[in-house]
Image (cartoon, grey):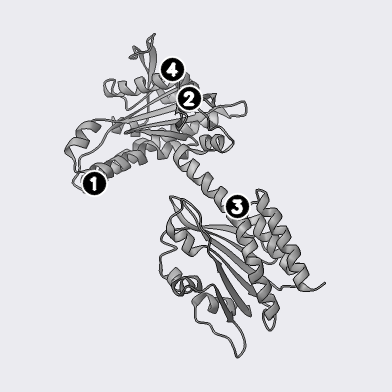
């Protein structure tokens, strides 16, 4: 069967993928293997695209025949540094080139980029790079300009034939359509997880986008609040207050995330996080992670305040309240503008508990339900009334060397 007919079959397969929900690595592996099977001697291929992510500027899949493929996420430094500036892709974008081909062996070899020298040393013989621009509404303008890049490399003696090169370029547009579907889904998930958290983001993407949609969730609730935030905001220059606020959030939110919690909201200078509990939860293991997160939070606060002093700025203080119970986890607001959050008496209770850290001498306070998960980490400090909560609650102070230092 002529290569042109076989390429049409590959294009048909790509069209089917675009209508589904393919995973990027599986999609690219499937394409490369099909190309090799129809006689296009692809030995190595790289698929790269810009993305919208708070940590990463671009993503890439590298495929090598006979080896597992891998997804790489490139941070902002990786896509602006010297390696990028000396890459064929940067060269193509600067000159608005859509196709770049280089022979890597023989009298026609042209190794004018560091990556080509490396590929030639691995006995690859031919290199073809193709860029397809496409617009992605809502993503920064550079996304459209950089578009979607594939580099194809072969180790066949003599390199790609002209027919091979033409077929690879023909396939590119259909591949771009299939990949755009995947990229849009990845960007949507990144945005929802960044702004809502993983659990809430999953629910929204599954269709929980109407006012009142949600569920009752049993969980440990972590609530933190910055002390004297009004005074700090009024007396510090805006840049200094923002730096202090972000250092505080690193101490109050980062340990909760690393312990497996989900930060639902930054409420002004407060942090609301939950640790969902279901039938399959290993509660002692979860409790251990939470308690380790509390210790880490105290240690980080001491370290951050050392940096504050080094910068000539005053220290910050905060409290953390913990309780365990049920929260309503879902959409609140108005139909046109929703927030996905946790509400209910448990949330009110934990905020009131945190307030008492200002007067009871412990930077971390918890209810008996939390303290019972690891009694050796807590000391009872008796019953105390909580503003707006009917009955006084027995509260427990968190015991650790770091907590004592912070107190």
Quadrant, the C terminus: top left
Which sits earlier in the primary sequence, circle 2 or circle 1?
1
Marks 2/3: CA distance?
A: 47 Å
Q: Residue 345: which numbered mark, if any?
A: 4
- Drawn side of residue 264 relative to residue 388, left or right: right
Query: Which element is circle 1 on?
Result: helix
Q: Which x, y percent locates residue 209?
A: 53, 33
Which residue corresponds to the image point at 56% horizontal and 34% vertical from the top-left? Answer: 203
Q: Which x, y percent locates residue 60?
A: 55, 60
Which sits earlier in the primary sequence, circle 1 or circle 3?
3
Marks 1/3: CA distance?
A: 40 Å
Which sits earlier in the primary sequence, circle 4 or circle 2?
4
- Drawn side of residue 365 relative to residue 102, left or right: left
Q: Quadrant of residue 223?
A: top left
Which sits earlier in the primary sequence, circle 2 or circle 3?
3
Marks 4/2: CA distance?
A: 24 Å
Extreme residue in the top direction: 391
Which residue corresponds to the image point at 54% horizontal and 58% vertical from the top-left? Answer: 72
Extreme residue in the right direction: 1
Q: Residue 181: which numbered mark, if any?
A: 3
Bin the neighbour count of mark 4 within 10 Å (Cα to Cα): few under 14, some 14-19, many 20 and up. few
Residue 321 visible in this rendered orientation of the protein: yes
Q: Nearer the viewer, residue 161 or 65?
A: 161
Which sits earlier in the primary sequence, circle 1 or circle 4?
1
Residue position marked by numbered label 2 in the rendering: 374
Residue position marked by numbered label 1 in the rendering: 239
Which residue corresponds to the image point at 48% horizontal and 44% vertical from the top-left? Answer: 191
């Amino acid at each position: 069967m002529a290569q042109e007919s076989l390429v049409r079959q590959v294009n048909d397969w790509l069209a089917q993928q675009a209508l589904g929900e393919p995973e990027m690595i599986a999609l690219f592996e499937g394409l490369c293997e099909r190309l090799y099977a129809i006689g296009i001697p692809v030995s190595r291929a790289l698929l790269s695209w810009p993305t919208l992510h708070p940590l990463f500027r671009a993503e890439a899949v590298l495929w090598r025949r006979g080896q597992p493929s891998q997804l790489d996420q490139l941070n902002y430094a990786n896509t602006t540094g010297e390696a990028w500036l000396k890459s064929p892709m940067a060269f193509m974008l600067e000159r608005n080139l859509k196709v770049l081909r280089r022979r890597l062996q023989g009298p026609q070899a042209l190794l004018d980029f560091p990556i080509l020298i490396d590929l030639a040393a691995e006995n690859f013989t031919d290199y073809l790079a193709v860029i397809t621009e496409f617009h992605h509404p809502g993503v920064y303008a550079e996304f459209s300009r950089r578009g979607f890049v594939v580099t194809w490399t072969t180790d066949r003696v003599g390199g790609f034939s002209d027919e091979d090169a033409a077929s690879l370029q023909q396939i590119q547009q259909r591949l771009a359509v299939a990949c755009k579907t995947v990229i849009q889904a990845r960007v949507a998930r990144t945005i929802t997880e960044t702004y809502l958290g993983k659990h809430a983001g999953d629910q929204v993407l599954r269709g929980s986008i109407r006012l009142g949609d949600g569920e009752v969730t049993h969980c440990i609730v972590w609530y933190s609040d910055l002390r004297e935030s009004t005074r700090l905001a009024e007396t510090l220059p805006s840049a200094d207050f923002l730096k202090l606020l972000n250092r505080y959030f690193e101490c109050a939110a980062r340990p909760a995330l690393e312990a497996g919690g989900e930060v639902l909201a930054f409420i002004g200078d407060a942090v609301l996080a939950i640790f969902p509990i279901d039938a399959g939860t290993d509660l002692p293991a979860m409790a251990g992670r939470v308690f380790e997160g509390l210790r880490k939070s105290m240690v980080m606060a001491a370290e951050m305040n050392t940096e504050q002093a080094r910068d000539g700025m005053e220290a910050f203080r905060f409290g953390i309240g913990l309780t365990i119970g049920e929260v309503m986890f879902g959409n609140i607001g108005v139909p046109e503008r929703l927030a996905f959050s946790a509400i209910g008496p448990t949330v009110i209770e934990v905020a009131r508990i945190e307030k008492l850290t200002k007067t009871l001498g412990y930077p971390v306070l918890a209810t008996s339900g939390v303290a019972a998960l690891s009694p050796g980490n807590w000391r009872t400090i008796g019953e105390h009334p909580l503003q707006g909560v009917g009955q006084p609650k027995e509260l427990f102070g968190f015991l650790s060397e770091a907590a004592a230092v912070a107190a």
